[in-house]
Image (tube, rainbow, N blue to C red):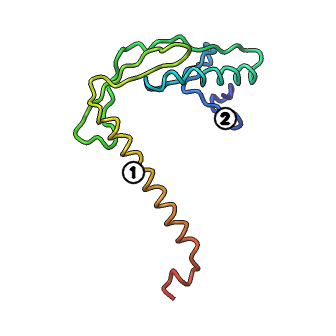
Amino acid sequence: MDEDTGGLIGDFVLKPDILDLGNNTVYEVKSLKQAPFGKAQVLSYLAALNLRYPGRIFTPGRWNPEAKTYNIFGLPGLVGIPVITIEAFNYGFGVIAWDFVGVPEWIPVFVAIGELVARGIQIYNARVAQEFAARPAFALLGF
């Protein structure tokens, strides 16, 4: 982070989910299933930040989310499901883990399928635009 502007420094490739510059702490937010992998990411952020800012010592965050559960309203693609509740907690070593509460197992799959379909549409549209741009101008006019 650029301390003057608070923005990301362009050449700083690693981007922690939460960087608390006031307390010099770093957090990575992961689903409960992915939480074990978060520690490695926090370690890489710490190494990079401690090299980048030699006068400061960054550590894994110890903050625990104040609320045990959070309601998320209006998830894209989930028509008819107004609210989903997640539980969030400090998994340890700067990792904030979250998990669905009382959600049927098919909902995360439905969300993932929706994301895959959206990506497929983006890729298709990009391919069509590329093919369109490659045509000679006279062909576009029907000649």
- Asked if residue 61 lies left or right of residue 122, the reply is right
Count the marks: 2
Residue 141 vs 83, above or below: the answer is below
User: Does the residue at mark 1 contact the one at mark 2 (Cβ under 8 Å)?
Assistant: no
Of tags 1 and 2, the one toward the viewer is 1
Q: Which mark is residue 13?
A: 2
Residue with the mark numbered 1: 117
**Residue 100 x/y as whole percent:** 34, 25
The first of marks 1 and 2 along the sequence is: 2
- What is the quadrant of residue 54 in the picture? top right
Amino acid type, callout 1: Val
Mark 2 neighbour density, 10 Å: few (under 14) some (14–19) many (20 or more):
few
Q: Is residue 56 left or right of residue 60?
A: right
Q: Is residue 3 above or below residue 12?
A: above
> Which residue is painted at 46% across and 60% down in the image?
124
Residue depicted at x 53% and y 83%: 139
